[in-house]
Amino acid sequence: MALKDVIGQEQAVGTLQGCVAKNRIPHALLFAGDEGVGKRLTAVNFAKTLNCNPSHPPLTKGGTRGGDLFLPADSNPQPPTPNPLIDSCDQCPSCIKIDKAGHPDVFFLEPQGDGDQIRVDAIRELEEALSYKPFEGNYKIAVIDNAEKMNQATANAFLDTLESPPSQSIIILVSSRPDMLLPTIRSRCRRISFTPLPVDTMSGLLKEKSKKLGNEQALLLSELSGGRLGYALNENLLKQRDTSFNILKRLLDGFEEEGLKDGQTIEEWFEWAQVWLRDTAVLKATGRSDLLINKDREGEIKALSEGAALKDILKLARELYNIRGYLKFNLNEKLTLNYTSLLMRKRLGKQDVGKR
Ligand SMILES: [Zn+2]
């Protein structure tokens, strides 16, 4: 694929293409936005565009492809729009190597190891690799995924390189939690924002992509994915949803298990729980099934809502949201689930719990 195939991020893609056309490519970029909206995909295809060869003339030597003719003037208040002339061919050896993460000038770094962190020695290696001239491309490009997982030492080690990277090198930080990056890192990068798609736009796109998808299912996938196309196209999304509901029912029955064994992590379950409780609260408050995300599970959601008062459903949603936040402190999974089960039974009207 190429930049033209990145769906729903016209502004981000247009901004990047504008930088190329103006021959003013920032040396450090921060791709910021929710998980699953297309940040990494854009980074890969931007790298392909920059190093695409040889079916296009080089992008920066002796002027720019397309030139300023295709650019909105600087004073133009319109948001940037995609420029189809600035893209990769998606077929040349360079593009293919980058797709396979095998290009000698393009580096991908992500958190590794027990601590799930970007280690300082990995950053040192990267810095050294960037210090050489490109072997075959126009640029050396580093894509650092989940960049917020640099600890303080790593981030500090990287500051100088971010401040003044070696010539012909471009660093792209990718993060769904840019707020967790050190301010000194953020301030050295040009931020490119990626946004979730509106539900209507997305369900239209989903139907285009998959002809067998009906209206209702496309809407359901759009809602469940929160406008994140990468999630919606994941075939497991509905399965994950159903798994989460099975777990929810088991928790309501009193949870006697050691932990989750359904292929869903406890973090994932707590996120899904918010979707179910949202629907339960909506049905309780309005009685309108057309406002549900999970319209196809109306009967079960109704059964959940009937035993509980609205204020208790909302309280439970808040409590589970808080537990979700504490999970990063490595809570014991069994104890956490037992406690959650207790809360759910109490709030959703299984009153026998208190009498035990
Ligand atoms: Zn190419």
Image: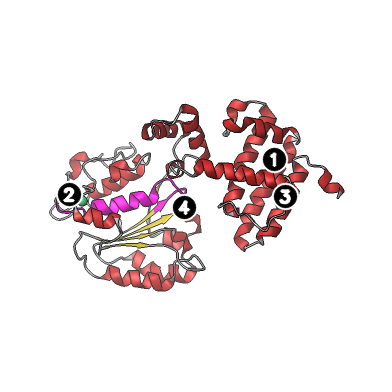
Q: Residue 104 carries which label?
A: none
Q: Which of marks 2 and 1 is nearer the N terminus?
A: 2
Mark-to-mark CA distance, 4 and 1: 27 Å
Q: Residue 341 carries which label?
A: 3
Q: Which of marks 4 and 1 is nearer the N terminus?
A: 4
Q: Judging from the image, what secondary structure is the residue with disc 2 in?
A: loop
Q: Is residue 143 left or right of residue 263?
A: left
Q: Mark 2 points at which residue?
A: 64
Please state which of residues 204 and 301 is positioned toward the viewer in this rendering. Answer: 301
Q: In this view, does 204 lie to the left or right of 318?
A: left
Mark-to-mark CA distance, 4 and 3: 30 Å
Contact, CB < 8 Å: mark 4 with mark 1? no
Q: Mark 4 points at which residue?
A: 176
Q: Magenta stretch: give its range.
A: 31-54
Q: Judging from the image, what secondary structure is the residue with disc 3 in?
A: helix
Q: Which of marks 2 and 4 is nearer the N terminus?
A: 2
Q: Which amino acid does label 3 sit on?
A: Ser
Q: Which amino acid does label 1 sit on?
A: Leu
Residue 192 visible, this orientation: no
Image point (31%, 42%), residue name? 5
Contact, CB < 8 Å: mark 2 with mark 1? no
